[in-house]
Image: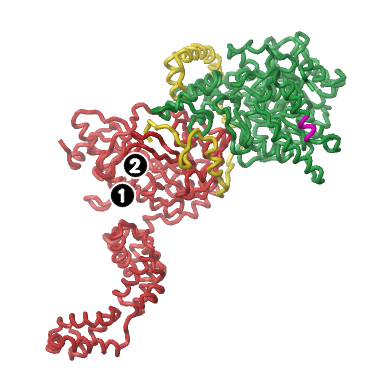
Chain colours: A yellow, B red, C green
């Protein structure tokens, strides 16, 4: 039986940048046990000789010519911005390294 | 206890890994049609795609594929018959989708190599750097950090984001690990990056200006005891913005690793930042906890399967490899190695070649570009290539000197004038009224005036004291505003004073 | 309606106003709409009327009003995807579907309610409250496109656009007694369709009749250079197929695995009756087997969350949408984390975490990797089945509309609603649901699902039209004429 502990879920929430409460983490951990068992069924049939599909259609080589098309106006580009300054998106201080 | 480099290489051998990112010079971005022109007002070159607005979808730039294939071919890679884009997932405000469209286990080019030649104690030696892969990805936006010291991210109050550069096409070239360079590691790395730069420039796919960021190098270094086959822990150094920095960074890291190892300390696997001013690296993000990028094939794009005939067409159209090209020029011009290196280091080889192509004598072309023009460039603290004087200007000047319409001295004035922005050589000559005074009678008049003005000196010459003529020639030159041909003045003067050329 | 518009019997403004009035009258109970663009719709309608007066040649649906699922961008109009994280966001660009609607002079009335980011089967996951099934307001209208389907059943709009990732057009159509079609994947552009699961999402037409759906299908489908996954081929002749409704000699394959004990008795009975009608119309009924279909649900619940965990990463409070926690000294990281916690609902967060897990290093092969292999197996099953049959059929979903709140705390039970619809998305083929009647146990609508091979969408419309005509004969009037009247209905 596959299970995810509360801490496992917390790690995933960190990767997904969602700040979950303790109750949520525990609840998810419980739910996942059931869900993961159900979805683990795929391993039953997914043999090594089966090729994975990542596209329903066998398209390939879809390209766009290297031609410039008009961009959005800065006003439109920034229209949804929660905060802006000097025609740039203003965001709080970034802690991580570049 | 500070180790010397020699101490380090006596005990350890370095293993290198180099990752080079190239900004392609396409007109539009990698996955959308926004312009790539540098320096535009913030957020004027964005669209739903590169801003990652909900609902937007990427589309692949055909020219970027072509450029990447050309790069792969020039680096002796195999072009994958089938390759895919993948999402590299991580969060950062300068990356709008919070994933980067890149390539993962199916890159477009694999298994190539670059040969570089460097001077060793035993003479010139060729090192083969194997290229693991060449793949395509997109660049991020740019952030301005406000409120901290010196605009750096630490201590900043907030940041301002400009997404004009988000989505610019990047090609990443990754080497396999490079052992066996011994004490020449820094030079080999530098030569590799220089050779890559020259190859990319000859393909015309990028500006490849390290100082501007269109060519970026990350250097990975680890040390192991000489004779061991156990790899040491590596560190990655970023922010290496020039060829010289590549060399310094690697040398510095080798010493730093050795000092730690000698002290019984572990080398930490981490990303470090190169500091131009000190030549040392500063610790950055720790790579102990490798970020889980959760790569998976990009579902919004379909695979790339380049037509074999197209690949062969591109292969046939590849320009001559720069190193071969240089050897050919060296033979043609009969130039000694030292002078060849000087031209390469000063980055004037192309422009000298262009000048020669326009009819100038190779030696003359070299002497102008490496001599006077380089001197002016150094004075102005710019690269020769950035001076507003072209191969055709220099070719024209050389031709005028050959024809006797200019003396070397006057020619230098013309060069100065062109660089100062006064126009093409003919315009400078006209505006400044530069011309060689060839009129013998005018010269004679000036000579007579000079002799009359300095009778004792003139007498010395008559008496056979030839060196004294110098002062008189100087006066004539002044009199003619430097426009006389000094050699001609000398011969006329001597004749006038009853002497022949000594 | 369009013939009345064409003949001048009614103007688009009048028609639009009638629908706006109906919305005002009943939507307080149905809650199909999140935003009604009264001014904009009337302006569009007026413009079409003017065009028509000037004698310009107009498309068949010109002037007809339509409800748009709130997952498609429409410039300047609020687009929320049923989520708090996009509350108030007005896109600066039109999705290609909207561009095509405008090209055809179709009047967009407003944006309809949906499960948040299209994740759900009941529209209970909307951050703005559920939509109520017009057949019984205490019941769900299906999901994720419950709003679009309900708007049709409540006569608030004659046409609607939905999107379908695992059944989100077809299942709501089934439980509301309307018609819903998921075209072949790539048949309709996804540019401007806010992505949930990129390799499964597809926008499609919703209507009260098969012919209306066909007309809308032709209006929105076609190649789009802005969508690299869109098909560069002519749109299948769906209108012609819907008009002919000819099934003589067509082989109709009944999928053995998409039936059985998990399916409500009344649902199964209506399915059998529909088969009889099709046989009477000249079709040959055959049985086919798709043994890998039983794994489809599991594979879907690995692929869709994986893709969505990546697609929804862009909602980070930096460039648009909700931003919370931006107080003194807060970092970008903390603002991001808090905004996503508050802005996303429970189901969305559940799927993001599941997807993050399925893609993690060490787990990729076992989960996402394996699921993509199952996809290949399902496609192979369909290929084999389509050798024996021209279309495949099944009940659209196992049950009729359940009560609001009934399955809300049991995610797995909720997921089972999609068991018959999901295989279609996994293989990228076309799927349609049309009403086959009301179940005798509860008098609630039941849907009949038709599946056609890639780019053979016209076959669904032929069979759908044939069944619809036969049912109409049997009932004497359209099914929706029996729907209980809504309070205040015009």
| In the foreground, C86 or B137 | C86
Circle nearer the viewer, 2 or 1: 2
Instruction: Between residue B69 and residue C422, name the one nearer to us.
Output: C422
| Callout 1 secondary element | strand
- Subunit of mark 2? B
Whichever of labels 2 and 1 marks the residue nearer the N terminus, that label is: 1
Disc 1 marks which residue? B126
Q: Residue at x 46, y 34 (%)?
A: B104
Res B309 visible: no
Q: Give the quarter of the image for residue C483.
A: top right
**Residue C252 sits above or below residue C47 on the image:** above
Q: Is residue B286 magenta?
A: no
Which label is found at residue B286?
none
Q: Are marks 2 and 1 on the same chain?
A: yes
Residue furthest out toward the top: C441
Q: Chain of mark 1?
A: B
Check residue C15 for magenta coloring. yes
* Whole-percent x, y for residue B262 in the image: 19, 32
From which residue to which does the magenta span run?
C13-17
> In this rendering, does residue C117 appear at all?
yes
- Give left or right: position of B24 versus C266: left
Query: Residue at coordinates 61% horizontally, 35% vertically from top-left?
Result: C192
Mark 2 highlights which residue?
B239
Looking at the picture, how far across and down is residue B3, in whole percent? 17, 38
Q: Name the residue: 31% across, 69% down.
A: B363
């Amino acid at each position: 039986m596959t299970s995810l502990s509360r801490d496992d879920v917390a790690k995933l929430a960190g990767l997904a940048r969602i700040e979950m409460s303790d109750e949520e983490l525990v609840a998810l951990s419980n739910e996942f046990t059931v869900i993961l068992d159900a979805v683990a069924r795929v391993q039953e049939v997914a043999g090594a000789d089966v090729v994975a599909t990542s596209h329903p259609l066998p398209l390939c080589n879809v390209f766009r010519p290297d031609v410039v098309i008009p961009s959005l106006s800065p006003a439109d580009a920034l229209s949804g911005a929660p905060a802006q300054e000097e025609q740039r998106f203003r965001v709080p201080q970034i802690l991580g390294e570049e | 206890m500070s180790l010397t480099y020699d101490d380090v290489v006596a005990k350890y051998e370095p293993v290198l890994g180099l990752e080079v990112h190239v900004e392609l010079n396409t007109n539009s971005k990698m996955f959308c049609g926004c312009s790539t022109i540098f320096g535009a007002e913030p957020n004027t070159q964005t669209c739903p795609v590169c801003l990652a607005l909900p609902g937007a979808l990427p589309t692949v730039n055909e020219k970027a594929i072509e450029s990447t294939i050309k790069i792969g071919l020039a680096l002796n890679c195999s072009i994958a018959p089938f390759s895919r884009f993948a999402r590299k997932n991580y969060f950062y405000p300068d990356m709008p989708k919070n994933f980067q469209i890149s390539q993962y286990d199916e890159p477009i080019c694999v298994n190539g190599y670059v040969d570089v030649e460097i001077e060793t104690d035993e003479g010139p030696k060729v090192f083969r750097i194997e290229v693991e892969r060449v793949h395509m990805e997109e660049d991020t936006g740019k952030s301005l950090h406000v409120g901290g010291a010196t605009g750096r991210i630490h201590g900043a109050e907030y940041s301002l984001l400009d997404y004009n550069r988000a989505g610019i096409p990047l090609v990443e070239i990754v080497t396999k690990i490079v052992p066996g360079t011994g004490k020449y590691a820094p030079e080999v790395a530098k030569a590799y990056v220089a050779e890559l730069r020259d190859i990319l420039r000859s393909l015309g796919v990028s500006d490849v200006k390290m100082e501007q960021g269109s060519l970026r190098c990350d250097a990975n270094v680890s040390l192991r005891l000489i004779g061991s086959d156990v790899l040491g822990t590596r560190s990655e150094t970023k922010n290496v913005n020039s060829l010289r920095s590549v060399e310094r960074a690697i040398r510095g890291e080798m010493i730093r690793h050795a000092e730690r190892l000698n002290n019984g300390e572990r080398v930490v696997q981490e990303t470090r930042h190169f500091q131009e001013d000190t030549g040392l690296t500063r610790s950055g993000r720790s790579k102990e906890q490798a970020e889980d990028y959760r790569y998976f094939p990009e579902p919004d794009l379909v695979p790339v399967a380049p037509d074999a005939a197209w690949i062969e067409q591109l292969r046939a159209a590849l320009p001559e490899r720069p190193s071969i090209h240089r050897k050919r020029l060296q033979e043609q011009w009969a130039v000694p190695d030292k002078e060849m290196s000087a031209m390469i280091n000063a980055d004037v080889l192309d422009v000298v070649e262009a000048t020669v192509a326009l009819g100038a004598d190779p030696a003359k072309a070299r002497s102008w570009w490496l001599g006077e023009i380089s001197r002016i460039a150094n004075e102005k603290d710019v690269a020769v290539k950035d001076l507003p004087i072209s191969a055709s200007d220099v070719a024209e000047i050389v031709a005028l000197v050959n024809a006797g319409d200019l003396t070397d001295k006057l020619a230098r004035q013309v060069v100065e004038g062109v660089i100062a922005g006064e126009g093409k050589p003919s315009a400078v000559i006209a505006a400044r009224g530069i011309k060689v005074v060839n009129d013998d009678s005018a010269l004679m008049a000036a000579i007579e005036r000079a002799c009359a003005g300095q009778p004792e000196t003139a007498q010395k010459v008559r008496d056979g004291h030839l060196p004294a003529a110098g002062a008189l020639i100087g006066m004539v030159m002044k009199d003619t505003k430097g426009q006389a041909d000094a050699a001609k003045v000398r011969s006329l003067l001597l004749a006038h004073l009853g002497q022949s050329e000594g | 309606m369009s013939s009345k518009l064409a003949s001048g019997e009614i103007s688009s403004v009048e028609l639009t106003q009638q629908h706006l009035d109906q919305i005002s009258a009943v939507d307080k109970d149905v809650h199909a709409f999140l935003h009604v663009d009264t001014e904009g719709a009337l302006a569009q309608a007026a413009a079409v009327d003017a065009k028509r007066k000037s004698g310009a040649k107009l498309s068949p649906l010109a002037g007809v009003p339509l409800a748009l699922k709130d997952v498609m961008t429409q410039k300047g109009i609020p687009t929320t995807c049923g989520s708090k994280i996009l509350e108030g966001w007005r896109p600066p660009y039109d999705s290609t579907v909207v561009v095509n609607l405008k090209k055809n002079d179709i009047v967009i009335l407003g944006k309809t309610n949906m499960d948040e980011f299209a994740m759900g089967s009941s529209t209970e996951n909307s951050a703005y409250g559920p939509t109520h099934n017009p057949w019984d307001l205490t019941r769900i209208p299906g999901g994720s496109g419950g709003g679009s389907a309900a708007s049709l059943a409540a006569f608030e709009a004659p046409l609607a656009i939905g999107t379908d990732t695992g059944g989100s057009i077809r299942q709501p159509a089934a439980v509301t007694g309307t018609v819903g079609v998921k075209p072949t994947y790539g048949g309709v552009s996804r540019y401007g369709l806010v992505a949930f699961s990129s390799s499964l999402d597809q926008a499609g037409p919703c209507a009260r009749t098969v012919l209306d759906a066909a007309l809308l299908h032709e209006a929105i489908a076609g190649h789009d250079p802005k969508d690299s996954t869109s098909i560069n081929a002519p749109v299948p002749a769906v209108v012609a197929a819907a008009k002919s409704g000819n099934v003589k000699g067509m082989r109709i394959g009944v999928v053995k695995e998409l039936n059985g004990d998990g399916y409500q008795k009344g649902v199964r009975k209506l399915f059998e009756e529909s088969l009889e009608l099709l046989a009477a119309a000249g079709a040959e009924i055959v049985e086919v087997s798709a043994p890998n279909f039983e794994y489809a649900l599991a594979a879907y619940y690995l692929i869709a969350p994986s893709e969505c965990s990546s697609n929804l990463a862009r909602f980070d409070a930096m460039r648009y949408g909700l931003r919370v926690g931006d107080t003194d000294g807060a970092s970008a990281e903390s603002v991001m984390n808090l905004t996503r916690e508050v802005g996303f609902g429970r189901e969305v967060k559940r799927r993001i975490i599941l997807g993050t897990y399925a893609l993690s290093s060490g787990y990729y092969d076992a989960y996402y990797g394996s699921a993509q292999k199952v996809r290949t197996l399902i496609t192979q099953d369909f290929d084999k089945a389509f050798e024996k049959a021209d279309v495949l059929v099944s009940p659209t979903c196992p049950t009729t509309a359940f009560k609001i709140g009934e399955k809300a705390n049991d995610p797995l039970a909720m997921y089972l609603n999609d068991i018959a619809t999901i295989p279609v998305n996994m293989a990228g083929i076309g799927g349609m649901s049309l009403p086959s009647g009301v179940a005798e146990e509860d008098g609630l609508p039941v849907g009949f699902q038709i599946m056609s091979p890639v780019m053979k969408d016209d076959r669904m419309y032929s069979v759908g039209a044939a069944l619809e005509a036969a049912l109409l004969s049997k009932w004497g009037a359209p099914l929706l004429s029996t729907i209980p009247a809504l309070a205040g209905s015009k």
